[in-house]
Amino acid sequence: MLTALKDSMPILIVTSEWYVSHTTAVAEKLFAPVDNVINKHLEDLFIFPLCVEEQQKTIADGSLVQVSLRTSPNVQFLLSFYDVRSNEIFVHIAELSTYYCQNPLEDEQTRILRHAVNSANLGVWCYDLLNKTAYFSPKFKSLIGLPASAELDWDTLKRMIYHEDQPLFAELLAHHIEQGLMLHFEFRLEVRGTIHWFEFKGEQVKYCIRTHSVYGILADCTHEKDMLVALHDAEESKELAMQAGKIGTWRAIRVANQWLWNWDHQANEIFKLSEDGIGNLHLWEASLHPDDKVRVTQALEASLNSGETFEQRYRGLLNDKDIVVVYAKGVVGLDDQGRPARIDGVVIDQTDVYIAQKKLQHINQELEQRVAERTADLEAAIIKAEQANRTKSDFLSMMSHELRTPMNGIIGSLDLMALSELDEDNQELLETASISANNLVSILNDILDLAKVEQGKMELESYPFSPSKMLNNIIKTFEAHARDKSVKLTVHEDIKLPLEVIGDENRVRQIIFNVVSNAIKFSVTDREGGAKVTINVHWVCEGVALSHLIFKIGDNGIGIAPEVQKKLFTPFTQAERSITRKYGGTGLGLAICGKLIDLMGGKVALKSKPGEGSIFTITIPIWRPRTQQQPDILFNTLYWLSDTPWQSSLALTQLYNACTHFCSEIKIIESPSEIKETDDTALIRVVTTQAEACVEQILSPIPELVFLDEKAFANLNSTALTTQKPKPIAPQTQYAIGQLLSKLKASQQDGEADLGELNDFSELDALLSLDDKASSPTDDKTDTNGKQHILLAEDNPFNQKLIVKQLSRLGVSCDIANNGKEALAMFKSKQYQLLLTDCHMPEIDGYELTKLIRAFESREERSAIPIVAVTGAAMKGDKELCLDSGMNDYVSKPVRLQELKNTLGKWLDMDFTQ
């Protein structure tokens, strides 16, 4: 056998006294430089842990002894002894580091153990206490981040341990050796830059009562440690959360036919039970409130029997006086046979919530009581305010009627007197009286408008209108007034301004009218360049249908102080008392404008400095019609003859741009000889040089308009012009240019040219109620086509006389009824073409009179007579009240002759156009 193994195994055969008798070649190499090991004692070759005599006593078949080479003490071997009872003992030599993987003679149990250790990811270690040497398996080194070939001794391992754990390592190892305590502890060690936790276990091996070596394992427990830390954190977090929420847990397990109860300290604390009371169900039941005890215990018993969830809110008595309110819920678990086997639940202390709810209920009751009282007070205040508002409205309506009634007599009489021939002094007195009366009506209108806005009774209308035409009418209204004050009034229109928009023209006009009126009123003529008021109109599209009409109205007048600007739109507010004394006014105009702008959804901005003038920027939302109206093309070709380019001034540019809307093309020429005469051409002649030099050139073969600048206009010898009146070069509205071109077109068709200044007074009638300077009416001596006989119901003698004279002037005769009762009787007895009736009369008022007449007409099957209200009431709803009562039309006092003529013209078969 020895011969068969000599080439592969390091084996010695020794005698019973441990002298070497045979050896293999492999074994001999281990002892170099010893030449011959035959007859040498094992103690001469190896360093044994014990003395030879003691060591021999411990040897048995299969014994392993760790030794060091005598010639090289650092080299360690494991000696395996076999057949120790014979005269030839078989000794296998193996290096300690490779023994477990190279020893072919290891038994089956050893191999199983080795594989189990490797599969468990355990490192093996051995520490020789005598020689202070250590063995570490490759897995051990791998676990601590070292390669298998790395040199590692016991001291190096201790130094690698985390410095805080090193004392523990040495202390526990010493206790294990000295006192026999179990060697089992954990330490930290840095592996590839990361701290790992390791579990270190070991057991000492004794020979002859003396510890020779310690064997053990090393396991990486970092993952388990992290899990424990996380679990501890979670448990601590849960515990804190449960304490913060005053939440306890409870459970019960069914064993045989009994339920074993348990709950945590938090639940015990909620019911203020003693420590030994945990799990004692009887103590818990004893702490329940008497009113809740039966209900709660029965519900718990039902859940334990049926498996249904337990959920109750109940009270507990603490120390027989304090009450705790809790909410408890438990879920029942079933066994494999479907029977209730356990219940787990929580109990939540809701005492604070209960107390807060009670306080909240008390507060709510008090609050509800206060709200009820306050609501009653508010309802009473609302009723009182509504009553006061109705009283105010009735008062304003009455005052409107009472003021307009005498004003009707004054203004109507002045209208009639203006139609008579008066000398210059009397005419001046008449104009003064007329202006004063109209100013008074304007103030009255402002007061009524303000009342309407403040009461929310002002309603906006929406209908198509021409912004250019509206602006032109405003300019025409103020031209004479501005000229009298030496104020240069100019207007600049946006070329993009559409021909027609949708909105409330009357209210937009009222706003612009008021601001322009103030600008002229507060203008200063002693400034360099004179007093100026400029109106700039811009058109800004915001979307498909909505746009903004922006008016910038500027002046170089007295300006407004910053502290006054903040309250400028407050009713009855003006800059200073001295301004009121000097310029007049009530201070209502801008207040009404501001409220109207707010009502329209617009905005107004003011930029002003005292002594430098003011600029009001008014932005009004305006709707565009779905289909845009286009201006009529009046001429195919419009010739432009000018001694200066049309781009040289703003006025010429505006004139040129306006003309483009009414012709197919504009041809700029330098001489009349370039004109090609057709039926569809016209000429625009602009002269900025001495007008005398071009008088002979004024006449042309086609209709023309002549525009002169201020200097040329002043030097023009008007007697030389027999067929035309030239116009001054000044910014004009698109509407005004269109009117001039329309009249030029008409003159071409009629064969005559009369291009005097346009005076379309019909467009100004709607402005008269807003103007603080009323124009005198035209002479209306009307020829009638047959007398019309109407009935007048009016209780005021002065108004009777005035209306009779106004009707007479219009060629209409009338019968007079002093009240509604007389009017009804006269209506029944005679046929009339129309009834003019006051609304407020004794006996029977105008509203009741109308209803009685309509009822009579229905019974007698008579045709309905036109009924027109003539009243001083001008509040919102007055006109609707008249129409709802059965009237056909409405005229507000003071009644002007022109307004009366227009109204009667709608209902009487008469020609008022003559």
Image: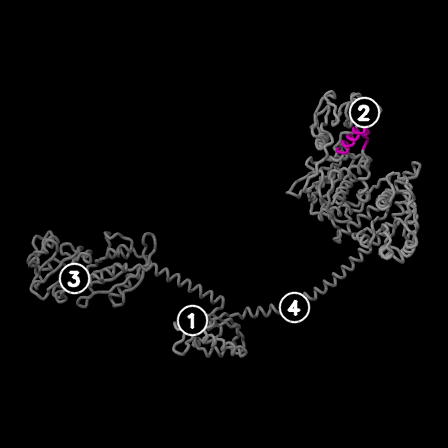
Say which residue label 1 marks: 333
Mark toward the start of the polypeptide (3 vs 1): 3
Tell me the tag on residue 366.
4
The answer to whether marks 3 and 1 mark residues whose Cβ atoms lie closer than 8 Å is no
Magenta residues, dominant SS class: helix
In the picture shown, does residue 635 fall above or below 248? above
User: Quarter holding the N terminus?
Assistant: bottom left
CB-based contact (under 8 Å), mark 4 and mark 1: no
Q: Between residue 222 and residue 877, name the one nearer to us.
A: 877
- Left or right, residue 777 beside residue 30: right
* Three-letter amino acid code of the residue under disc 1: Gly
Q: Amino acid at mark 3?
A: Val
Give the image location of residue 206, x and y in percent: 19, 66
Q: Nearer the viewer, mark 3 or mark 4?
A: 4
Tell me the kind of residue under disc 4: Glu
- At mark 2, the secondary structure is helix
Q: Which residue is mark 3?
A: 65
What's the amino acid at mark 2? Answer: Asn
The scheme the figure's colours follow is one colour
Mark 1 or 2, closer to the camera:
1
In front here: 406 or 290?
A: 406
Query: Magenta part of the protein: which range?
Result: 737-757
User: Could you give the CA–CA distance between mark 4 and mark 1, rounded to whole angstroms?
Assistant: 48 Å
Cα distance in 3D space between marks 1 and 2:
116 Å
Give the residue pinned by disc 2: 715
C-alpha gap between disc 4 and disc 2: 89 Å
x, y percent for residue 389: 78, 57
